[in-house]
Structures are given as C-alpha cells and as structure tokens.
Image (cartoon, rainbow, N blue to C red):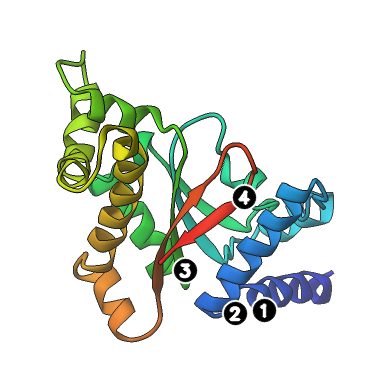
Amino acid sequence: MLFVTAAIALAAEEKNAVTAEEAQAMLMEGNARFASGNVTHPDQSAERREELVSGQHPFAVVVGCSDSRVPPEVLFDQGLGDIFVIRTAGQALDDVAIGSIEYAVEHLSVPLVLVLGHDSCGAVTAAVKGGEVPGHLVSLVDFIKPAVDEARNSSNDSELLNNSIDINIKNIVEELRTSKPILSEKIEKGELKVVGARYHLDSGEVEILE
C-alpha cells in the first residue's frame, strides 16, 4: 500500500513538472477538444480523487470571469486537480485574488497564469455604459474603467465593448507581470509566464492575445 501511495504521488509530481509553454499547449489542446465536441472529461475518476487526497499539483492558473457561461474546467476539458481557478466578475483583481495566484505560483510551483476574458462580458458592459451602479458593483466598474477610457480614445461606438474587453485583459496581465514581490520575481527568473486570452461564446474557442 505504501508503494502504491508513493507511485501515485510521483505520478502527480511528474504531471506538474511541465514548462509554461507545455502548460499552455495542454490548455489549448483541451479547448480544441471542447470546441469540437470531443471532450474526454479527464481526471474525474475515483483513482484521481485518491491521488489528490495527499495534495494538489495543478499545471496552470486560470484567472477567469464569474460568468456562468465560462467555467474554465469545462472550456479547457480538464478535471480534478488540473487547474487552479480564480474567478471574479470581469477578472477584477484585489489583494485576495492576487494572493491566491501567488499561493499557486509560490507553493504549488505552477508555471503559467492565463487571464481569460470573454465575449459579451457583463461587467465590462456595465463599465462601458457608465452611470451609477448599486452596492459593491461600483468596485467592479472602477477596476474596469481604465480599460474603457483607453478604448474610447481609439474606438468607435461599435468597437468600444470589444476593445474594452481586450484592453481589460491586457491590463490585468500587465498588473500580474509587475506584481511584487512574488510574481515579478518568478517571471524574471524564467519560472513563470502570464498570458491573456479571450473565450468566444459562439465558437467555444479560446484565443490567445499576443
């Protein structure tokens, strides 16, 4: 029994021993399966649950939107213990969200952070419309507003929402890349990559934003 447990732990460590490029490829391969309707629903067995009792070894962090249409585990065809997910409306960051990302990077040695925005984002739409919003929604609008302001300078009305979504993603990527001390130092050492991506609701495809 001890040998079996050790073998399971070793397998988990080997799965996590991937580069950022390999992790990104694994996500995109999973998304290709999802978009084409050929999902495999990996790592959802009783054996996988037993493997994870002793610890987790996710290969990527996905910072996504809370929107019910964009669950990362589904979009990337991943299972239990595969990806470390942080979700807030509009991918808005605060200290808790960044601390959660730092935990995955520092303590779980995750090599890739993917910031995932999506078409028709309600939080970005609210920021584009402007005006007063109730309750704590103002914190979301305030977070996204710089992206909308930047988009207004280079967009016509028909492009404003889409450009705001993309700029918001890029702003979040930049914030994480320069976040001190943990994330920026990991990037400088070549141990971490942060990329932005956008999910298209109609096709089911994820597009990496360069």
How far apart marks 1 and 2 lie (CA) works out to 5 Å
Report if residue 109 is visible in the image.
no
Write down the residue under mark 1: 14
Circles 1 and 2: CB atoms closer than 8 Å: yes
Report if residue 47 is visible in the image.
yes
Circles 2 and 3: CB atoms closer than 8 Å: no
Write down the residue under mark 4: 205
Look at the numbered disc 1 and give the secondary structure of its residue.
helix
**Mark 4 vs 1, N-terminal side:** 1
Whether residue 54 sits left or right of residue 157 in the image: it is right
Nearer the observer, 27 or 10: 27
Q: Which mark lies nearer to you, 2 or 3?
A: 3
Q: Which mark lies nearer to you, 4 or 3?
A: 4
Where residue 17 is drawn, which disc sits there?
Answer: 2
How far apart marks 1 and 3 lie (CA) works out to 16 Å
Write down the residue under mark 3: 112
Give the image quarter of residue 188.
Answer: bottom left
How far apart marks 2 and 3 lie (CA) works out to 12 Å
Q: How many marks?
A: 4
Look at the numbered disc 2 and give the secondary structure of its residue.
loop
| Picture coordinates of residue 180, whole percent (x, y) | 19, 68
Of the 4 image quadrants, the one containing the N terminus is bottom right
User: Which residue sits at x=23%, y=48%?
Assistant: 95
Q: Which amino acid type is shown beneath numbered disc 4?
A: Glu
| Picture coordinates of residue 64, whole percent (x, y) | 45, 45
**Mark 4 vs 3, N-terminal side:** 3
Q: Which amino acid type is shown beneath numbered disc 3?
A: Leu
**Mark 2 vs 4, N-terminal side:** 2
